[in-house]
């Protein structure tokens, strides 16, 4: 026999599952949206590092930029790994 409490709990579980799926989809979309421009910035910095140094930007500053972008890429990769339902 169906208990009304069981039925309500099942509805809450379905809603919670839908909310989690929606959250995962948004996190995945955000991670992809952030990763692409970061990759472009990293490539531009690396490609133009010599020119930037000639214009007076310290090499250490450029390396910090590249290192921080790599760190952010790692964080985004972790997000993507944790939001991928097939993993």
Image (spheres, rainbow, N blue to C red):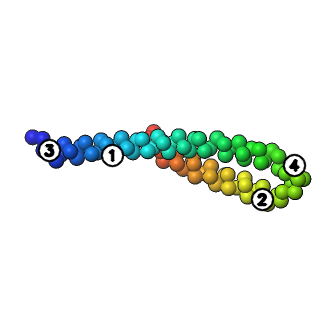
Q: Which residue is mark 3?
A: 4
Q: How many marks?
A: 4
Q: Tell me if I can see residue 33 in this picture.
A: yes
Q: Secondary structure at mark 1?
A: helix
x, y percentage for residue 45? 77, 48
Q: Which residue is mark 1?
A: 16
Instruction: Examine the rendered structure and indicate whether residue 85 appears above or below residue 64.
Output: above
User: Callout 3: few (<14), some (14-19), or many (20+) C-alpha neighbours within 10 Å?
Assistant: few
Asked whether the beta carbons under mark 3 and mark 1 sit within 8 Å of each other, the answer is no
Which residue sits at x=27%, y=45%? 12
Tag 4 secondary structure: helix
Dot 1 crowding, Cα within 10 Å, few <14, some 14–19, many 20+: few
Find disc 2 in the rendering and name its residue. Answer: 61
In the image, residue 36 above or below residue 49: above
Provide residue 73's location: percent of width, then percent of height.
Answer: 62, 49
N-term mark: 1 or 4: 1
- Residue corresponding to mark 4: 51
Of the residues under marks 1 and 2, which one precedes in the sequence? 1
| Left or right placement of residue 61 versus residue 55 in this view | left
How far is mark 3 from mark 1, CA to CA?
A: 18 Å
Residue 81 seen in the current view: no
Q: Secondary structure at mark 3?
A: helix
Q: Are marks 4 and 3 in contact (CB under 8 Å)?
A: no
User: Label 3 to label 2, Cα distance in Å?
Assistant: 63 Å
Crowdedness near tag 2: few (<14), some (14–19) or many (≥20) residues, C-alpha within 10 Å: few
Q: Residue at x 60, y 44 (%)?
A: 34
Instruction: Residue at 59% x, 41% y: name it.
Output: 33
Residue at x 33% of width, y 45% of height: 16
Q: Earlier in the sequence, mark 3 or mark 1?
A: 3
């Amino acid at each position: 026999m169906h208990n009304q409490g069981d039925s309500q709990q099942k509805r809450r579980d379905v809603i919670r599952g839908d909310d989690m799926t929606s959250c995962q989809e948004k996190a995945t979309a955000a991670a992809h949206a952030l990763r692409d421009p970061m990759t472009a910035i990293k490539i531009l910095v690396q490609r133009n590092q010599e020119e930037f140094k000639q214009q007076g930007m310290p090499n250490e500053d450029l390396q910090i930029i590249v290192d921080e972008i790599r760190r952010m890429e790692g964080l985004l990769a972790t997000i993507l790994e944790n939001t991928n339902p097939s993993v």
